[in-house]
Each structure stands twice: as C-alpha cells, then as structure tokens.
Amino acid sequence: MVGGQMLDIDSDSNIERTQVLKTGALFRFACEAGAILGNADPEPLRQYAKNIGLAFQIADDILDIESTAATVGKATGKDVVKGKATFVEILGLDGARRKANELVIRAIAALDGFGASADTLRDAARYVVARKK
C-alpha cells in the first residue's frame, strides 16, 4: 500500500497500477483472507476483488466529478485541482461508467462456482457502482 501511495503522489504514474496497490490491496486482502484461512482456492475471490476494487475507484472518480461534498461526505473536485490522473479524465465520463460496469460483470462472473452462497458478494459488486457516496 505504501508503494501505491507513492505512485499516487507521482501524477505521471499508471493510474490502474496505483489503484491495485492502494484501494485494490484492501479489497484483495478482505476477499482472499477467508479462502486462505479455510484452505480454499483464493483465485476466484482474487479476481472478484481485483475487479470490484478497480470499479470502486472508477466510481469514486465519477463521484468526485458529479457529486457534492454534502452528498459524499468529503470534498469533491479535489483530484482535478491537484492535477491527478483519474479514470474520468482518461476514459471520459461515459467511458468510465462503461468500464466500471464491465468490471462489475467480471467480478460477478468470478463467483460463478459459488452458486447462491455468493449472492451477498454479487450485491456488493453491484453496489460499488450504484452508490451515491
């Protein structure tokens, strides 16, 4: 995560790589830990986490542009002011939305082998892009 924070400070860094090392690392640990502790294959949950972690960051970038501080509970527009690369800047608003939705579809697909027992994780993936804060 420290490496991700360093990349975040460097505005020329690869935005996807930065996310994987920051927010993505938190999602990955939360999703993989149970499988590892239960001696199960962590790969499906690793793929789920990779996709929702990135979708979460894209949704966050969209909220930073479209929402208000009162709604999200934190300052908005700060990434633009700081000149930070965002997925909205790179992909455009519609492109960022499409990418986030594609990532949610991939995350849900990674859970196919779990049947109905993974419905809560599927709902969480959908929430990542539907959230308003």
Image (cartoon, rainbow, N blue to C red):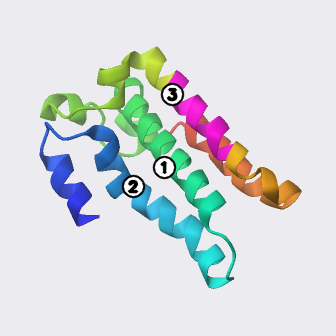
Dot 2 and dot 1 residues touching (CB under 8 Å): yes
Q: Magenta: predominant secondary structure element?
A: helix
Residue 32: x percent and y percent? Answer: 57, 69
Q: Is mark 2 on a helix, strand or loop?
A: helix
Q: Give the range drawn in magenta.
A: 98-108
* Residue at 69% across, 75% down: 40
Residue 126 visible in the displayed image: yes
Mark 1, other Cα within 10 Å: few <14 / some 14–19 / many ≥20: many
Secondary structure found at label 3: helix
* Drawn side of residue 11 relative to residue 58, left or right: left
**41 displayed left or right of 8:** right
Q: Is 99 part of what is drawn in magenta?
A: yes
* Kind of residue indicated by mark 3: Lys
Q: Residue at x 12, y 45 (%)?
A: 10
The crowding category of the residue bearing disc 2, from other C-alpha atoms within 10 Å (few below 14, some 14 to 19, many at least 20), is some
* x and y, in percent, of residue 83 in the image: 14, 30
* 69 within the magenta span: no
Between residues 102 and 23, which one lies in front from this camera angle? Answer: 102
Looking at numbered disc 1 in the image, what kind of residue is underneath it?
Gly
Q: Circles 1 and 3: CB distance less than 8 Å?
A: no
The spot of residue 65 in percent (x, y) is 35, 26
Residue placed under numbered mark 3 in the picture: 99
The vertical placement of 84 against 93, above or below, is below
Q: Which residue is drawn at 62% across and 68% down?
A: 42
Q: Residue 53 carries which label?
A: 1
